Structure formats: C-alpha cells, structure tokens
Image (spheres, rainbow, N blue to C red):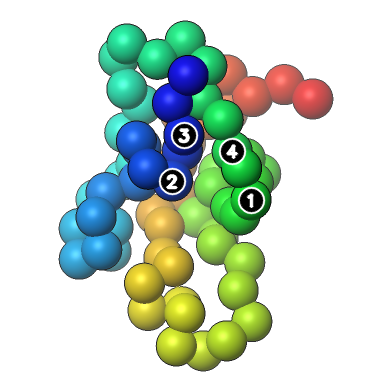
Amino acid sequence: CALFKTHCVPSIPQRWWQTPSRPASARVIAFPGDPNPPDALIGHWPTKKWYKKIYKHIRPTTWIADYWRE
C-alpha cells in the first residue's frame, strides 16, 4: 500500500511542474486526508490559507481516472 501524498507527489519545488507518478510496485494507493481522488484528478489541493497554496500544490493526475471507481 502506498500513500498518495508521500509516495506519488513529488517534493516541494518539483510538484509545480512535475505530475505525480504511480509507483509501479503499488497495488493499492491510499488517500488519507486531502487531496481526495477527485481533487487530485483535476489538480486541486483544498486549502483555505493563502500561504499553504505555495506548498500544497499538485498538477492534474490523469492516471487516477483509469483506476478510480466509487
């Protein structure tokens, strides 16, 4: 099991231009907290404070649509 925020999302400066990657060895990817799969799919990390938008940024992760089912 891999965590989306720690195993898929790149570190802070790279997450502005690099799309989150899917770990090849992971069979399950967990989404604890934010961003949720629908948010990550469109590239939105919900936050209210303006300064958190600097480091809580994510590019659209289109590979989630291939695997996500509700």
2 or 1: tag closer to the N-terminus? 2
Residue marked by disc 1: 33
What is the quadrant of residue 26 in the picture? top left
- Is there a contact, CB below 8 Å, between mark 2 and mark 1? yes
Disc 3 or 1, which lies upstream in sequence? 3
Does the residue at mark 4 contact the one at mark 3 (Cβ under 8 Å)?
A: yes
Q: Report which residue position mark 2 lands on.
A: 5
- Is the C-beta separation of discs 4 and 1 under 8 Å? yes
Name which of mark 4 and mark 3 comes first in the sequence. 3
- Residue at image coords 55%, 43%: 41
Q: Determine the CA span between mark 4 and mark 1.
A: 6 Å
**Would you say 39 lies left or right of 13 here?**
right
Name the foreground residue: 32 vs 13.
Answer: 32
- Residue 50 percent across, percent down from the top left: 51, 89
Q: State the image quarter where residue 65 is shown.
A: top right
- Mark 4 highlights which residue? 31
